[in-house]
Image (cartoon, helix red, strand yellow):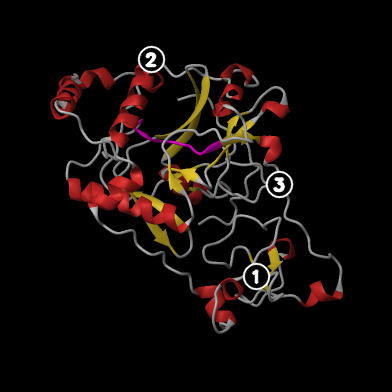
Amino acid sequence: MGAAGQLRRRTRARTPPSRGEGSADDDDMSCEACGSGDAAAELMLCDGCDRGFHIFCLRPILPRVPAGDWFCASCRSPGPTKSAAAVSSVSKKPKQFPLIQTKIVDFFKIQRSPPGAASVLSSEAKKRKRKPAGALVVSKKKRKLLPFNPCEDPAQRLRQMASLATALTATGAVFSNHLTYQPGMAPRSANRAALEAGGMQVLPKEDVEALSQCQRMMERGECPPLLVVYDPVEGFTVEADRFIKDLTIITEYVGDVDYLRSREHDDGDSMMTLLSASTPSRSLVICPDRRSNIARFINGINNHTPEGRKKQNLKCVRFDVGGECRVLLVANRDISKGERLYYDYNGSEHEYPTHHFV
């Protein structure tokens, strides 16, 4: 799967800004949710009403203090002012995407199956079934990555895709299953794995085919067996909707590609390192705030506690695929149905603030 050094941070976190250290006003400031004035570096003021809130008392929690303006739930919502208790404890459940096949087909731009496609799928499935079980009983380093195994029931897949559409719509994003290159951002020519400091592991040919198979299945509407659910503490999160084998490709991390230098003061908490170049000005990040897939909603572990680290069931690994950098989320153990998916946002580095993650 690759050494720990191959894993990179999800984002470059900034030190939370202090708000007038030592002033009398700060001495009196307290959190509207818990009533405490402790942890001043993580206590922020609403730019609308000047009330204070700990980032870890919000629901969902925030990983860090935003660099720009921030407004509490009362100031974001029209209508009568809510009480402090309501602000701190009530989270708005997102509106569900319609469970209508035509709407889901349009949202995900699912391709219509050409004649004979079903027989091709059947052949692929039979080939996988005929593979002798002994082929996988080798050292883990030499084992191949597996394409995800979609649910056979079309109605179940429809529910899974509707859950993702709900999350994307609520966050103002559209679906994309590929890295995208937008005018004014990094061009595709900038995505060169050869620029990686220390080199980047090459995805073997068999695993490239497994990744391509995952993409083809998604284009046909055969999605990974995953559900996006809304948790009042964690926000959107992802859980397995069927058993998933170790070393299964869950998804590729996608979004708009941009230079890191253009995003160092960006408040987005879902940026992923794509290229960590020897020349820092060439480093790239993936920005999934406008175009993304289910990877954006998979949460991170609290890697400051043994309990948090035990929850990890995915690894985030960067590969050289045809000379370009790609980021894959891969199961690092068997995952049971109903189990939530987690990976380490920091990998071998510790710049992302995960100490308040559940």
At 70% from the left and 42% from the top, the residue drawn is 264
Please say whether residue 271 is visible from this viewpoint. Answer: yes
Q: Which residue carries the number 1 mark?
A: 53
Q: Which residue carries the number 2 mark?
A: 205
Q: Secondary structure at mark 1?
A: strand
> Residue 315 colored magenta?
no
Q: Quadrant location of residue 243?
A: top left
Instruction: Look at label 2 and name its amino acid.
Output: Lys
Instruction: Look at label 3 and name its amino acid.
Output: His
Q: How many numbered markers are drawn?
A: 3
The residues colored magenta run: 247-256
Instruction: Look at label 1 and name its amino acid.
Output: Phe
At 45% from the left and 65% from the top, the residue drawn is 232
Q: Are marks 2 and 3 in contact (CB under 8 Å)?
A: no
Query: Alpha carbon of mark 2 to alpha carbon of mark 1: how far?
Result: 50 Å
Where is residue 192? Give x, y as percent: 58, 20
Query: Alpha carbon of mark 1 to alpha carbon of mark 3: how far?
Result: 22 Å
Q: Secondary structure at mark 2?
A: helix
Left or right, 23 with respect to 266, comes to right
Please say whether residue 139 is visible from this viewpoint. Answer: no
Left or right, 15 with respect to 83, comes to right
Q: First in sequence, mark 2 or 3: give its number.
A: 2
Where is residue 277? Give x, y as percent: 66, 24
Q: Quadrant location of residue 205?
A: top left
Where is residue 235? Give x, y as percent: 47, 59
Q: Which labelled disc corresponds to residue 265? A: 3
State which mark lies toward you, 2 or 3: 3
Q: First in sequence, mark 1 or 3: give its number.
A: 1
